[in-house]
Structures are given as C-alpha cells and as structure tokens.
Amino acid sequence: MNKGSATHLVLIPSYNSGAKLMPTVRAALDQWAPVWVVVDGSTDGSANELPSLAAANAELRVWVLPRNRGKGGAVLFALKEARAQGFTHVLTMDSDGQHPAGRIKDFMRASLATPAAMVLGTPVFDASAPKLRVQGRKISNWWANLETLWAGISDSLCGFRVYPIAPLIAVMRRQLWMRRFDFDVEAVVRLSWRGVRAINMPAPVRYFTAAEGGVSHFHYWRDNALLTWMHIRLFFGFLLRSPLLLARRLPVS
C-alpha cells in the first residue's frame, strides 16, 4: 500500500512528551503520510525540533496551540482543520512512543475497506505494563460495554485508533466534556450510540520507564474520578437510549 493518502492522516496530539516525541513522529512518517502533530501547550521543550523536521519534510505538519486544551480539545482542533482540507479519517496515536507505528498501515487498510466504521486498537501488553492500570481498565471496559449493550468495543481506552471525522465532530460539538482524559472512552461509546461499528485489531503497547524517556501524565485519583463522572453521564445517557440500542441488537424478522 502506498503510504500517502488524501483521505486518511495520522494525528499525534502532544503535551510535554519528553524525549519520545521525535522518535514517535519519525516512526509515523516512515509508515504514512501525511502526519500531523498538535503541540497542545507544551512547556518542556519536547517540540522544539519539530519545526525544522517539518521544514525538511512536506509530509509533516505541526500545529502549536498556545495553551493546553487536553487531548480531546487538541484532537477536535485537528479534526476541524482536517475536514476543512478534505480529509475524512484520522488515526490517533500517543506521542510517548507507547503505540506501534508499524501497525499504522494495517489500521488504515481496515479503515479504507470499511470507511463507515471506527478501527479500535486492542492493546497487547508486555511486562512493562503497570498491573494496576491493566486491571483498572477492565472496569472501564466493562462499563463501556454495558453502555453500548456489548456492541463490540474490545477496549475503550486505547488511543491507537482510526476515527471517521464527520461523526466524531458531530458528537463532540454536542458535548462540553470529553476534552481531556475522558476523551477516548466517551468517543467510542457515543460513536457506537450513533451506529458507528467498531472493528477491533490488536496493537502492542509498550510502557517506558523514566530512565528510558517515558513520560506519564496519568494521575490515579484525578483521572479515575474523571472516568467515574464520565461513566455516570454515559450510564444515564445509555438509559435514555436503551430501547434504540436494544432494537439494534434484536434480529430482524
């Protein structure tokens, strides 16, 4: 497959990503074009080399936001720009090197074959994954499946995924939330409510230590409180939509 595309782009939102940002961007460029990076109010100097890399590579575009909007806010900014330029899909991946650039083409291929669907990464963890977080995500995944009546979301938290742009913008325009750590889960649940089918594909995930250049902005109590509030909202939304969701699951006579 030719790595260039007029409809699908790779989107990397970045906030204080440390030493892993540049290798992540280069790895994505090796697999696909175009690649967009949204620097979301970073203050650690991790994005300082991006302008020169973009100047030397027409396949890379860098957006610098003056203040931090959160992951969802940075993604929404890029979605609007991408749609205005004629793109229909974005593959999001984290800027900290956790996600497998080598899987970009496979995910894009699946999206190009079924453009109405969202292609979701199912993380394959190695020994580097913190056990507490691996166990904790099972709770969020259970709730996401309940809220969609088990519509086929294998993992609700993995940020390595391909979104169709138009329905995601429509979802986010109706919400004041899903701008920060709650973005990934709420996006797939609300897209599922809109009838966007999930295609699940494995994606190896690597957690880097601080000595390896890894950076984590996850705060256990703050972010779990945010997820709890998010699932409360989604659960009541699910109750309102449950007749429609149930009708979708019933066989057509």
Image (spheres, rainbow, N blue to C red):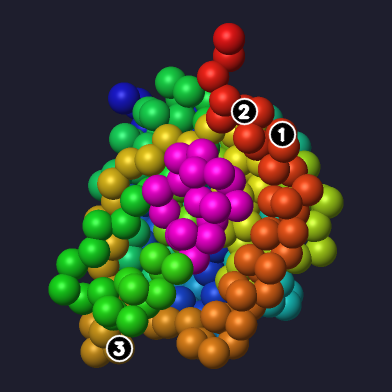
Residue with the mark numbered 2: 248
| 3 or 2: mark nearer the eye | 2
Does 141 lie within the magenta span?
yes
Name the amino acid type tagged 2: Arg
Part of the protein shown in magenta: 140-155
Residue at x-position 66% and y-position 48%:
190
What is the distance, in whole Å, between disc 3 and disc 2 at their CAs? 46 Å
The quadrant of the picture occupied by the N terminus is top left
The secondary structure type at the circle numbered 2 is helix
Pick whichever, 136 or 94, lies toward us.
Answer: 136
Residue at x-position 43% and y-position 21%:
113
2 and 1 marks in contact (CB < 8 Å) = yes
The secondary structure type at the circle numbered 1 is helix
Q: Looking at the image, is mark 3 or mark 2 earlier in the sequence?
A: 3
Name the amino acid type tagged 1: Leu
What is the distance, in whole Å, between disc 1 and disc 3 at their CAs? 47 Å
Q: Residues within 10 Å of mark 2 (few under 14, many from 20)?
A: few
Residue 85 on image: x %, y %: 70, 35
Pick whichever, 252 or 115, lies toward us.
Answer: 252
Pick whichever, 188 or 81, lies toward us.
Answer: 188
Viewed as shown, does residue 17 lie left or right of 204? right
Vertical placement of residue 170 versus 42, above or below: above
Q: Is residue 211 visible?
A: yes
Residue with the mark numbered 1: 244
Residue 156 on image: x %, y %: 48, 56
Residue with the mark numbered 3: 210
Does 195 lie within the magenta span?
no
Residue 110 on image: x %, y %: 39, 29
Pick whichever, 163 or 227, lies toward us.
Answer: 227
Q: Residues within 10 Å of mark 3 (few under 14, many from 20)?
A: few
Name the amino acid type tagged 3: Ala
